[in-house]
Image (cartoon, rainbow, N blue to C red):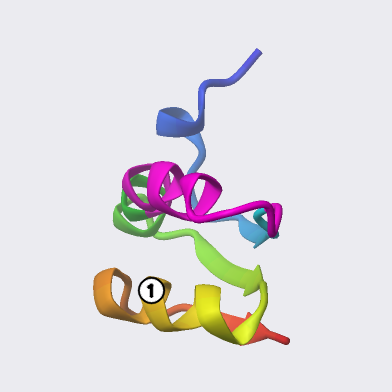
Amino acid sequence: MKGYQNIKNERILFSPLNWGWGHVSRSIAMLQVLIANKNQITIACAAEQRKIYEEYLANVDFIS
């Protein structure tokens, strides 16, 4: 099984649960690693979650 640190050059759709801010905050470091590994990230999330992700992540697409 691949750890997320070894995933490179892939298209990834990520959607955190909307049960509070814990899912969003814990996923930021993982998404930063995936971005650094040249993955194309699309995040499907609520508007409130998007605001937080936009503070920490660049070059990410969003789906509402």
* Circle 1 residue: 52
> What SS does tag 1 mark?
helix
Front residue of 32 and 24? 24
Magenta span main SS: helix
Front residue of 60 and 2? 60
Q: Position of residue 4 (x, y in %)?
A: 50, 32
Query: Is 14 rendered above or below residue 58?
Result: above
Rendered residue at 32%/71% (across/down) = 57
Indicate the quadrant containing the N terminus: top left, top right, bottom left or bottom right: top right
Q: Position of residue 33 (x, y in %)?
A: 33, 46
Indicate the quadrant containing the C terminus: top left, top right, bottom left or bottom right: bottom right
Q: In the rendered structure, which amino acid carries the disc numbered 1?
A: Ile
Rendered residue at 53%/68% (across/down) = 40
Rendered residue at 67%/73% (across/down) = 45
Q: Quadrant of residue 62?
A: bottom right
Left or right for 63, reference 48: right
Per the image, is 18 magenta? yes
Left or right for 8, reference 16: left
Estimate how packed mark 1 is, as few (under 14), some (14 to 19) or many (20 or more) residues with alpha carbons within 10 Å. some
Rendered residue at 62%/72% (across/down) = 42
Left or right for 13, reference 52: right
Left or right for 15, reference 59: right
Residue extending furthest front? 20
Segment colored magenta? 17-31
